[in-house]
Image (cartoon, grey):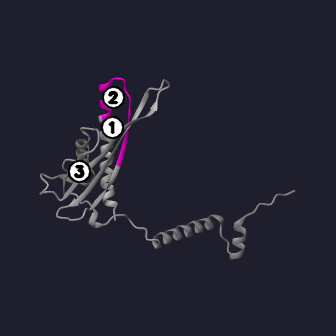
């Protein structure tokens, strides 16, 4: 008994009465799907986020005063402030202002939460790895502006290894705080430019 294979292209070719290979048909179908998708996306109002008014232009000065601290960490606000200035320069070409009066952009904020918790354990129930999480409320204003350009709450975290030596444990926590602060600063700069 001979098996019959179903070929969907046979019927299409018979309908069109044209000699077209299956590869040409597949290409045409894919092209049609891609064009339909682009048409639908354009019709639904999709566009690039952000606008010229919230774009952070290179060469502007940035002022980050002392960040208020409502957490248990005595030094976290200083590390976050430094990360905001460094990432602002590295990612957008912003430079630190000499004073608040000279600044084109002014960032203010409050460190709302600083927490560490064990996230993995050894076979004898000793902590193997910790996660440091910071949560900061930030606000960005332009010079002379009455309304904030951006305001919101951001959170960042970083894992670090546990150590029985307290000095090494403290050093790992400080490195995790610096890394989490850089992540937070990057999220901040991205959020400012992607806000509507």
Q: Residue at x 29, y 35 (%)?
A: 174
What number is the disc on residue 176?
Answer: 1
The answer to which image quadrant residue 168 occupies is top left
Q: Of 92 and 8, which appears nearest the observer?
A: 92
Across and down, in percent, residue 126 comes to 44, 26
Left or right position of 103 against 3: left
Query: Is residue 153 shown above or below 124?
Result: below
Of helix, strand and loop, which one carries label 3? Answer: helix
Q: Earlier in the sequence, mark 2 or mark 1?
A: 2
Q: Report the magenta residues as a range.
A: 155-173
Q: CA distance from mark 2 to mark 3?
A: 30 Å
Q: Of 168 and 12, which appears nearest the observer?
A: 168
Of helix, strand and loop, which one carries label 1? Answer: helix
What number is the disc on residue 169?
Answer: 2
Left or right position of 32 against 90: right
Q: CA distance from mark 2 to mark 1?
A: 11 Å
Q: Residue at x 38, y 29 (%)?
A: 162
Say whether marks 1 and 3 touch (CB < 8 Å): no
Q: Is residue 22 visible?
A: yes
Q: CA distance from mark 1 to mark 3?
A: 21 Å
Mark 1 or mark 3, whichever is nearer to me: 1
Q: Earlier in the sequence, mark 2 or mark 3?
A: 3
Split into 4 quadrants, where in the image is the C terminus? bottom left
Q: Which residue is mark 3?
A: 89
Across and down, in percent, residue 94 comes to 21, 54
The answer to which image quadrant residue 114 occupies is top left
Mark 2 or mark 3, whichever is nearer to me: 2
């Amino acid at each position: 008994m001979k098996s019959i294979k179903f070929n969907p292209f046979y019927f299409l070719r018979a309908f069109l009465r044209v000699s077209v290979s299956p590869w040409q048909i597949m290409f045409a179908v894919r092209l049609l799907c891609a064009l339909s998708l682009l048409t639908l996306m354009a019709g639904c109002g999709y566009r690039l986020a952000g606008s010229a008014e919230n774009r952070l232009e290179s060469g502007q000065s940035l002022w980050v005063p002392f960040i208020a601290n409502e957490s248990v960490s005595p030094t976290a606000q200083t590390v976050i402030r430094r990360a905001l200035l460094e990432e602002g320069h590295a990612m957008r070409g912003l430079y630190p202002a000499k004073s608040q009066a000279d600044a084109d952009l002014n960032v203010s904020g409050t460190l709302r939460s600083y927490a560490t918790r064990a996230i993995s354990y050894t076979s004898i129930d000793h902590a193997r790895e910790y996660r440091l999480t910071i949560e900061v409320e930030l606000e960005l204003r332009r010079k002379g502006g009455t309304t904030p350009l951006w305001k919101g709450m951001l959170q960042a975290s970083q894992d670090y290894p546990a150590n029985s030596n307290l000095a090494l444990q403290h050093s790992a926590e400080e490195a995790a705080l610096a890394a989490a602060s850089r992540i937070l600063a990057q999220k901040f700069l991205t959020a400012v430019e992607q806000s509507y």
